Image: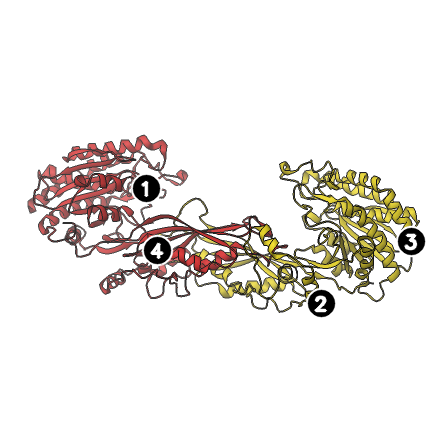
Chain colours: A red, B yellow
Amino acid sequence: MNNGIDAAIRYAEAENERFLEELKDFIRIPSISALSEHKGDVLAAARWLVDALTRAGVQGARLVETEGNPVVYGEWMGKPGAPTALIYGHYDVQPVDPLNLWQSPPFEPEVRDGKIYGRGTSDDKGQVFMHVKAVEAWLKAVGELPVNVKFCFEGEEEVGSGSLPGCLEANRDLFQADVLVISDTSMLAPGRPAICYGLRGMAALQVDVYGAKGDLHSGIYGGGVPNPIHALVEILASMHGSDGRVRVQGFYDRVRDLTPEEREAIRGLGFDERALARDLGLSVLVGEAGYNYVERTTARPTLEINGIYGGFQGEGTKTVIPAEAHAKITCRLVPDQDPGEIMDLIAAHVSRHAPVGVRVEVQRFDGGRPYVAPLDHPGIQAAIPAYEAVYGTGPVFTRLGGSIPIVEEFHRILGLTAVMMGFSLPTENNHAPNEHFDLGNFKKGIRTLCVYWNELARRGLGEAEGA
Amino acid sequence: MNNGIDAAIRYAEAENERFLEELKDFIRIPSISALSEHKGDVLAAARWLVDALTRAGVQGARLVETEGNPVVYGEWMGKPGAPTALIYGHYDVQPVDPLNLWQSPPFEPEVRDGKIYGRGTSDDKGQVFMHVKAVEAWLKAVGELPVNVKFCFEGEEEVGSGSLPGCLEANRDLFQADVLVISDTSMLAPGRPAICYGLRGMAALQVDVYGAKGDLHSGIYGGGVPNPIHALVEILASMHGSDGRVRVQGFYDRVRDLTPEEREAIRGLGFDERALARDLGLSVLVGEAGYNYVERTTARPTLEINGIYGGFQGEGTKTVIPAEAHAKITCRLVPDQDPGEIMDLIAAHVSRHAPVGVRVEVQRFDGGRPYVAPLDHPGIQAAIPAYEAVYGTGPVFTRLGGSIPIVEEFHRILGLTAVMMGFSLPTENNHAPNEHFDLGNFKKGIRTLCVYWNELARRGLGEAEGA
């Protein structure tokens, strides 16, 4: 089998220039899922991927219909008894505005200084394409893969993955596998590969406070009637203590603490808090006492007020007591917090802290569950030697502060543990102008994935969850 | 002199229909000071008043130039040794929008159901005109007034009286008098005349809180960086206690307490708090503990947040930590609070309560001083029998929750005590569509003023402040 790896890697090295030209074709399709005028382009990108999988030697590549944009499916199941990996990614991209800040047009990919520029190069077409090419390398150079693989590339990730859970539930057998492999996260820094093993969940709400039936003159009524802004700031201020902890009763009850090993690993990352503060224009970073910045933003739950509004917002002064005031809140959740329960706790807190005289309502928006993978999962452990072989160093293990809600859905619906091997860099302008992708990581990443399939086959998945 | 009063009153009664027609002419001039396209109309209203004063027998009626709209001046000084009253009012009016809510056009005065409808009928052209006609009644029927009078009618009251203080300072001799008489407030209710003896002052500020140099993703940075909205609500919530008192240190230090007599008088007004709450759509009225609604809104200082804004304010959710957040504040002040000092105290409070990590600024806007007249001033005492003679009941003494800042300026610049005899009703839609003025009070008010000049002459001003 070792000869197999060498052959696959040699193939990938030899064909690298062609891979790059093909990737450019993929990037040229403006598959912006948020804009209805690009509906046809989104479909074109899906069809392009079906062709690319077929050309790579993948079998039965096709579109699976959903309520929205189709899922691209394909498989190679020629290794009975070996583990089956489901490879997830997305072929839709973010909008490009502000267009004038792009140095080269977003859908005319251009290589500058060892990087390919264009919308989707890093998030996530470039990484999706690397998986296609690693499989192609094995199939074309060796004639087979050491494991079985299935592909699930969706076209709605940038608009919330609304159709995918239903598609997974409706096609459980098709997508059934032993492990989930995703390349849609980032490395820690150049030369420092990372496996993301945790994603925070979310609970989003709005607090609405109502006073008198109309705005009142604050000269005439001031001091005599309830002011909804006063009530709102009192309610909101009660949600945090001076130690930075959330004071909503029960908020931390289900939080799974970091293990000493995790805290050790996070401290070992050598994150430079002072440099970040400087970059953000801040004198100091703040937050929950007892945790460092990385812990606070990835492994601790938060409650952030994202917006507040009420009354007069123009220039100067208007002497009004407004009839209403509002605030937007999102919480980031960690295992084992439940978004519905957190919304209940916050609603109860708001009721408890609402002063006399005002009427208070809580609107509930989206919720998403947190996810954390077991670090000792053999699918994750198999990635370590793959990175070491190519990068000369093993991956660090990171958690992401934000969420990729679909990861938790894969776990809940199909029982799959996710191995998140990302090859982009945190500085590659995902969602922003001048998105780009480092061609060194493009090349090394394909090679890492080639080795990974071999390591996964060699170790197997044993008794692992999802096996 | 008693024959004089009778003659003056008979004249006013006999000429009432003509007075009303002349008032309609005055109302027809759309002297909206806030809108530059009405500049010519504002000037036309001033000129109309000069003519009206001249026709009434007032001497030297003319325009006094200011930095803005002119002041209308006139005098009758034929009673050497008698008190001199300066009569203040304004000939400018509020804008009329929303126009579609007017039952008849705002500048086409119409009498319906014993009331005259039109912009300015109550605020303040109708009341200004009553003073002109009361003086005319004495001069035409008797040939003289029992006191000396001067007129000072400005054209910028509805836009903040910006030019008047400078005009008063530049023309001290011209405007010098013994007492100030103003009809720009309201009665307590139909049949219940009122003298307003107190006006709250104002201090207006904005609190600005700044965090990172740009908006941040609350998934990625949430829990790790300062959130300016959190800081703002914490600062604002610290400004009131649960007893409704303002917790800014020193805020109440200079507050002149209500006398037991004043509190007695306010309780004697029989104000129906429950009815007001119902009208406003509130379950209950709230405010500073230990004071009733009338005390809280007229004789106690307040701190009201008039507006708040920061971050995302659209539909649904946006996961952002904003770079900044803002709040608008106005305080209503009572004697002997000083607006500049109150702004200092609030700025110090904001600094003291600003959490670590954010930068906080306080912008200072307008300030206006509170005013309260001594109830035992003979100019005020003289009004009691005048009301009794015409309304069959003496006036109640009220304070106004809002401010007419120019009253305090007259006191400060010219040393004048104000006698605020208002004849409008609180329900006459000042500043709103369908402004109107009760013709019964128009008639009774002119008569009351005729009697007042006689009472003022009879009692004199003795050793009173401003005499």
Q: Which residue is mark 3?
A: B78
Task: Tell me which residue sits at (43%, 57%) in the image.
Answer: A350
Q: Amino acid at mark 1?
A: Glu
- Letter of the chain that mark 2 sits on in the rendering: B
Disc 4 to disc 3: CB gap under 8 Å: no
Mark 4 neighbour density, 10 Å: few (under 14) some (14–19) many (20 or more):
many
**C-alpha separation, residue under disc 2 versus residue under disc 4:** 55 Å
| Residue B73 placement (x, y as % from top left) | 82, 49
| Residue B117 placement (x, y as % from top left) | 72, 40
Task: Tell me which residue sits at (63%, 38%) in the image.
Answer: B101
Q: Are marks 2 and 3 on the same chain?
A: yes
Can residue B64 be seen here?
A: no
**C-alpha separation, residue under disc 1 versus residue under disc 2:** 70 Å
Q: In this image, B451 relative to A57: left or right?
A: right
Q: Which residue is mark 4?
A: A342
Q: Are marks 4 and 3 on the same chain?
A: no
Of discs 4 and 1, which sits in the foreground?
A: 4
Q: Amino acid at mark 4?
A: Ile
Q: Which mark is residue A158?
A: 1
- Letter of the chain that mark 1 sits on in the rendering: A
Mark 1 neighbour density, 10 Å: few (under 14) some (14–19) many (20 or more):
many
- Letter of the chain that mark 4 sits on in the rendering: A
Q: In this image, B445 relative to A437: left or right?
A: right
- Letter of the chain that mark 3 sits on in the rendering: B
Disc with the residue nearer the chain's start (4 vs 1): 1
